[in-house]
Amino acid sequence: MPPPWLKPLEVDRLAGTEADVDFAIPLAELPGLRSLRDGVTGSVSGSVHFAREQGLAIAEIAVRGTVTLECQRCVKPMQLPLETVARVVLIGSEAEAGRVPADLEPVLAEGGRISIGELITEELLLMLPIVPLHADGSPCAAEPEPAAHGGASETHQPFARLDELLKR
Ligand SMILES: [Zn+2]
């Protein structure tokens, strides 16, 4: 049986009943996240509260957990503790984005349906760094050349260079 967070849910019904949905998701099993953030593992849990405000379907997402990403400098795992609350507006089509107030993030629920997994993926893509790097002061930050490790593969070089460009 597929996990409950993969099941598409009807936004209208959830918002109308002010539903609360708890979740616990292993990140390696989120296809959308895995395809955009190489080597992401860890897990998150939390709850989503649905509501309707001024004709808009709102989702309040409370998420916590630890995300493991690959540091683009030393190519070793890097743990990112996560604890956040976000409010998004669920829209049924791109055309509805114009009705969303500027201070709220629209998330597309195609045809009025979205799974908790898709919702969390959207949220994580906004929160996680595009170029994850160990913080200053960690052993890897002291090493100027990523290649010095000998483990850095070709595919990581563009990211390392991007990091250098951003520091200028
Ligand atoms: Zn590192």
Image (cartoon, helix red, strand yellow):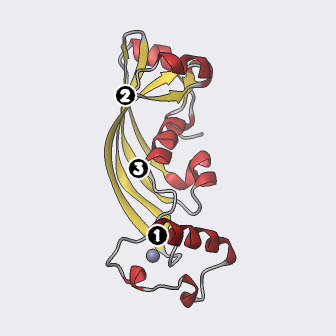
Which residue extends farthest front?
168
Residue 7 appears in which quarter of the rendering?
Answer: top right
Amino acid type of disc 3? Val
Given this view, does label 2 or label 1 mark the residue nearer the observer?
A: 1
> Counting other residues with Cα less than 10 Å from the Cα at mark 1, is it few (<14), some (14-19), or many (20 or more)?
few
Quadrant showing the N terminus? top right
Locate residue 37: give its quadrant.
Answer: bottom right
Between the C-alphas of marks 3 and 2, the distance is 25 Å
Vertical relation: 69 (above or below) 64: below
Q: Residue at x 41, y 25 (%)?
A: 102
Helix or strand or loop: what does disc 3 sit on? Answer: strand
Q: Is mark 2 within 8 Å of ligand 1?
A: no
Give the distance between the C-alpha atoms of the residues marked 2 and 1, in whole angstroms. Answer: 31 Å
Q: Position of residue 153 (x, y in %)?
A: 65, 78
N-terminal of the two: label 2 or label 1? 2
Return the x and y of residue 10 as percentages of the image width and height: 53, 19
Above or below 56: residue 64: below
Mark number for residue 168?
A: 1
Tag 3–tag 1 contact (CB < 8 Å): no
Q: Determine contact: label 3, label 2, CB under 8 Å.
A: no
Sequence-first disc among 3 and 2: 3
**What is the number of the mark on residue 103?**
2
Residue in the picture at 48% in, 15% down: 99
Res 44 label: 3
Q: Amino acid at mark 1?
A: Arg
